[in-house]
Amino acid sequence: MKAGNLEVQIFDNRQEMGASAARTVAAKIRELLKTKEFINIIFASAPSQNEFLAVLSEEKNIAWERINAFHMDEYVGLASDAPQNFGYFLKIRLFDKIPLHSVHYLNGNATDIEAECERYSQLLTDFPTDIVCLGIGENCHLAFNDPHVAFFDDPLIVKKVSLDDACRQQQVNDACFDSFDEVPQHALTITIPALLKAQYAYAIVPGSKKAEAIQHTIEDEISEEFPSTILRNHPDAILYIDQHSAGRLTEISSYK
């Protein structure tokens, strides 16, 4: 199935979805490393990525030591070793399992947040993104670009944002936090145009709680009201969904 430029692949379950995405990303990494000394990858941190990350971490014949890794967002003011911390999430699920050339963490506890945004922006400028592996939020956010701060022409590369209520509630729905009030109100995020500068984009989005977001992503007009719709303009992007996240697509029978 295609939605604009966006290729959409639907799987019976999230295990098959994550494994397929991991195999595709691994193949692309191997392909790029044939012609590039190093490649740069941005990863998402969320339970939706668990199956994907588990399989990717076990892929063989990848020169991980030629890969620079980044992550796309981070809470402001959350302890660096908190289980909800996005850098820590990726550290234990992927970064500690493979011999990467470098890992660049966003520091949501920096004393000067503006300087931290500038530091990470410079890194992303110095190491242009080859691959971005991302999710889509229940409110259609990409990274922490919730609709009220999602700008398709954002001049910034990394910025501090406030999180909307739907975004914060999703963190409770995902069992990352016990209550809404525990979820931080602010985060650092790579902006939408910076994410989409990646040559290749892979979005992994399982689960029934994402069904409405997937419907918006594929069927609504491209707009900042539903930030993930912009994926349909990316020249080389694949969306991986399961039967649950595909559940509200109006023409699903014709997509299979």
Image: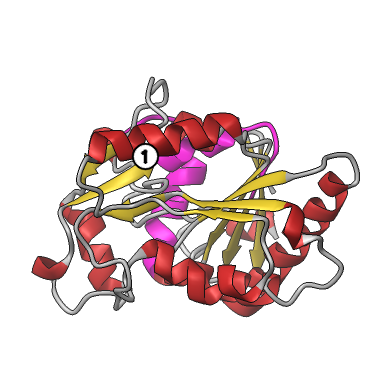
Please say whether residue 140 is one of the residues in the magenta stretch.
Answer: no
Could you tell whether 97 is left or right of 117 in the image? right
Please say whether residue 212 is one of the residues in the magenta stretch.
Answer: yes
Is residue 23 at least partly visible in the picture?
yes
Residue at 87%, 68% in the rendered image = 61
In the picture shown, does residue 232 fall above or below 50? Answer: above
Please tell me how many numbered marks the rendered image carries. 1
Residue at 50%, 76% in the rendered image = 92
Residue at 37%, 46% in the rendered image = 141
Q: Which residue is mark 1?
A: 226
Viewport quadrant of the C terminus: bottom right
Could you tell whether 6 is left or right of 145 in the image? right
Residue at 53%, 35% in the rendered image = 124
Judge by depth and name the residue closer to the eye, 231 or 24.
24
Label 1 packing within 10 angstroms: few (<14), some (14-19), many (20+): many
Judge by depth and name the residue closer to the eye, 72 or 205.
72
Could you tell whether 256 is left or right of 207 in the image? right
Is residue 220 at least partly visible in the picture?
no
**Label 1 amino acid?**
Phe
Residue 134 x %, y %: 52, 53
Q: Where are the magenta residues, as a range?
A: 209-238
As helix, strand or loop, the secondary structure at mark 1 comes to: loop
In the picture shown, does residue 193 fall above or below 183? Answer: above
Residue 168 x %, y %: 21, 60
Q: Main secondary structure of the magenta part?
A: helix
Residue 158 x %, y %: 38, 35
In the picture shown, does residue 5 fall above or below 32? Answer: above
Please name the colour scheme applied to the rendered image. Answer: secondary structure
Residue 210 x %, y %: 41, 62
In the picture shown, does residue 63 fall above or below 177? Answer: above
Name which quarter of the figure residue 226 lies in.
top left
